[in-house]
Amino acid sequence: MIMILYEAKSASRNGGKVARKDGRYQVWEVKCLKEGQRIFLKSLDAKGAINICQDKDNIINVMVEGNRAMHVEKLLRERNIIYQVTVTDTTGKFGPPYRVKSPSLIVNRHKSPSKGIMDWKDFYPLETINKFLDSLEKHFPSICTVSVMGTSVEGRDIKLLKISNSDASNTAVWLDGAIHAREWISTAVVTYIADHIAKHFDTLSTSITNKDWYLVPVVNPDGYHHSHAVDRMWRKNRARFGNTITGVDLNRNFGNNWGRSGGNEFSSGDPNHINYRGFEPFSEPESAAIKDLILYSGTPFKIFLTFHAYSEVISFPWCYTADPCPDYVNLLEGGTVMAKAIYDTNGRMYKVGNFKDIMYYASGTSIDWSYGTARIPFSYLVELRSKQDKFVLPKDQIEDTCKEALNGVKALAEFVDKKKCLNCDVYTSKKVR
């Protein structure tokens, strides 16, 4: 159970107690019946919306400041998390909640900046991202092409930007963001890189122009929209299980070692779990769209970069095992090149290593699939800023994060041209799971 403070204009249905409006705290006792509920509560604590004071068995004691509580109450009810108000008036003897300089849980739609569509001084909703991609195609038609590579569970377009000089000898680079909806900085980074390459293509080095760039800023448009409009901390897509929207973790839905046995950290078969893998590999249209485009594009991909938040690491396969992948040394060297470029930009230190060693076990991930099945030799999952602010990166750090990531990508693009492409087989007809 969890204790939470909340503000209300009338008596709570959970005990008839009324929260104060003067900034004091109220305590709730909430019962976590499922591991996914516990993870969700910890995400609220990390966000600063609540303060977990005690966690024992299935009971968690939490405090919430009055002006946050109505929304937290709504989030718990939507997930069928049982709670009871136990203390209605406390000055916070457990200590006040941790605060971060970040957006609130409920985020209003942004208006585009008056000058230009995006300026990387804010996080923008889906429609602004899509308009931005269309604007690049309009202003740079000789190198930029926007297409719809698939549609989401709820029917939204998954937009892809390709930047290319149409040289048949080019290899390809894949960059994606927002496979996890709440990781907004990943979308900012992919759009920033797209903007830089499109606007400066003629003056960039050969290591950039000798590649076709495939950029998908929002892999998970339904979840991304939901995180802007309703629930800032939403992670999964918006798939239904029965009549309930539970969502699937798209980064557990890829075919390589999908559903591998292990704890819930690998992946979960529980639709309510934050790492729910779906009912089969590529069950979700969002992950299936990535598979189909890469395997049947006719272009040999040499780099696969998927951006996440917030651990500040550059990781590579494998995720499902501690065993090193065949190209461990090359991947470690490439990741180190990226990390050095990032450090040289802003002094930020990113850890480099295989995913399991520096993160945790996970199965059905996109980089295990891109490396192990699609045979993209330089496959990386990059966790962006920030370990301090977690998913709610302050707006004044957006542009710095984008700049350091851009320089890391540039350094990797130069590095891979010096290495032999070991796994660049192009799939043209055979479907691969």
Image (tube, rainbow, N blue to C red):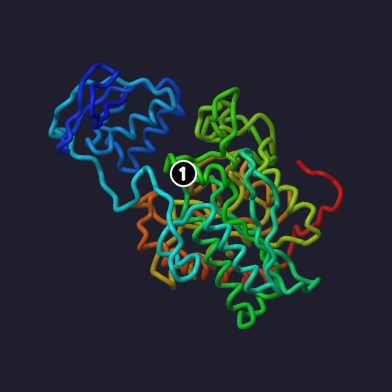
Mark 1 falls on what kind of element?
helix
Q: In the image as oriented, which residue stretches furthest toward the bottom? A: 203
Q: Is residue 35 left or right of residue 302?
A: left
Q: Residue at x 39, y 55 (%)?
A: 386
Question: Is residue 315 shown to the viewer in this render?
Answer: no
Residue bearing the label numbered 1: 227
Question: Is residue 241 shown to the viewer in this render?
Answer: yes
Where is residue 259 drawn, in percent x and y?
Answer: 64, 32
Q: Quadrant of residue 97?
A: top left
Q: Quadrant of residue 399?
A: bottom left
In the depicted view, which residue is nearer to us: 272 or 17?
17
In the depicted view, which residue is nearer to us: 164 or 308?
164
Where is residue 264 drawn, in percent x and y?
Answer: 52, 31
Where is residue 69 drawn, in percent x and y?
Answer: 28, 33
In the image, residue 110 sits, relative to residue 79, either above or below, namely below
In the image, residue 133 sits, relative to residue 234, either above or below, namely below
Q: Is residue 124 left or right of residue 392?
A: right
In the image, residue 88 sits, relative to residue 97, either above or below, namely above
In the image, residue 90 sits, relative to residue 234, either above or below, namely above
